[in-house]
């Protein structure tokens, strides 16, 4: 039996699913969502915390409902903290966006195949992909794929 690829969704993906202000991104995310059964899908407690920080109560409830069935990883390990700080110290991710480094570290430490994100500023960038994988290989981790939903 062929193993389903493991996907990690950062918070931008469920957000886009419900974001009516960006109809193209919303439609692409909803198309992607129809194919999630082809993958093992994961989130983290950071995704849950970011969703719970959503000001709009109805939206917050809808977001939680969207991700409730996905397996969630803890971000509390020392290994994730150290790796996140490594991405920051090497200027791959800016320090003020430490959460982005944590998402990447969760994927790396838990041997997830693919990080899915709509964050083009810090995550879904060729420079980030190359530098994250250089650090990962240097530190003995597997390289990871970083993609936007439309690539799947």
Image (spheres, helix red, strand yellow):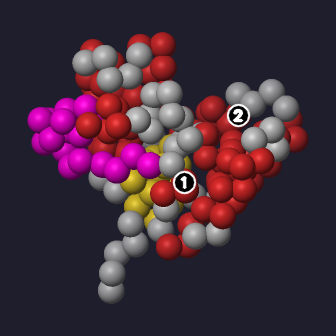
The residue range painted magenta reads 131-147
Instruction: Identify the mark at residue 149; answer none if there is no mark.
Output: 1
- In depth, the one of 150 and 110 nearer the eye is 150
Q: Position of residue 3 (x, y in %)?
A: 34, 75
> Which residue bears the numbered disc 2?
52
Pick the quarter of the image with the N terminus: bottom left
Q: Residue at x 26, y 37 (%)?
A: 130
Q: Position of residue 74 (x, y in %)?
A: 45, 41
Is residue 80 one of those drawn in magenta?
no
133 to 24, vertically: above or below: above
Q: Residue at x 50, y 73 (%)?
A: 38
Q: Residue at x 49, y 62 (%)?
A: 152
Name the front one of labels 2 and 1.
Answer: 1
For residue 38, side relative to residue 29 (left or right): left
Instruction: Tell me how far mark 2 sits from mark 1, CA to CA.
Output: 23 Å
Is residue 143 one of those drawn in magenta?
yes
95 to 14, vertically: above or below: above
Secondary structure of residue under mark 1:
helix
Q: Position of residue 23 (x, y in %)?
A: 77, 47
Secondary structure of residue under mark 2:
helix
Query: Is residue 107 visible to the viewer in this orientation of the structure?
Result: yes
Number of marks present in the image shown: 2
Instruction: Identify the mark at residue 33; answer none if there is no mark.
Output: none
Could you tell which of marks 2 and 1 lies nearer the N-terminus? 2
- In depth, the one of 149 and 47 nearer the eye is 149
For residue 121, side relative to residue 90 (left or right): right
């Amino acid at each position: 039996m062929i193993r389903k690829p493991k996907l990690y969704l950062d918070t931008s993906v469920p957000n886009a699913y419900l974001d009516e202000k960006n109809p193209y991104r919303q439609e692409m995310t909803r198309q992607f969502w129809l194919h999630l059964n082809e993958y093992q899908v994961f989130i983290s407690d950071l995704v849950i915390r970011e969703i719970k920080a959503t000001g709009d109560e109805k939206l917050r409830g809808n977001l939680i409902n969207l991700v409730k069935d996905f397996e969630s990883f803890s971000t509390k390990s020392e290994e994730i903290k150290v790796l996140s700080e490594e991405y920051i110290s090497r200027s791959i991710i800016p320090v003020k966006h430490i959460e982005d480094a944590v998402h990447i570290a969760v994927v790396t430490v838990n041997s997830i195949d693919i990080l899915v994100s709509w964050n083009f500023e810090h995550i879904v960038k060729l420079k980030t992909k190359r530098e994250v994988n250089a650090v990962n290989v240097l530190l003995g981790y597997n390289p990871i794929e970083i993609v936007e939903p439309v690539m799947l």
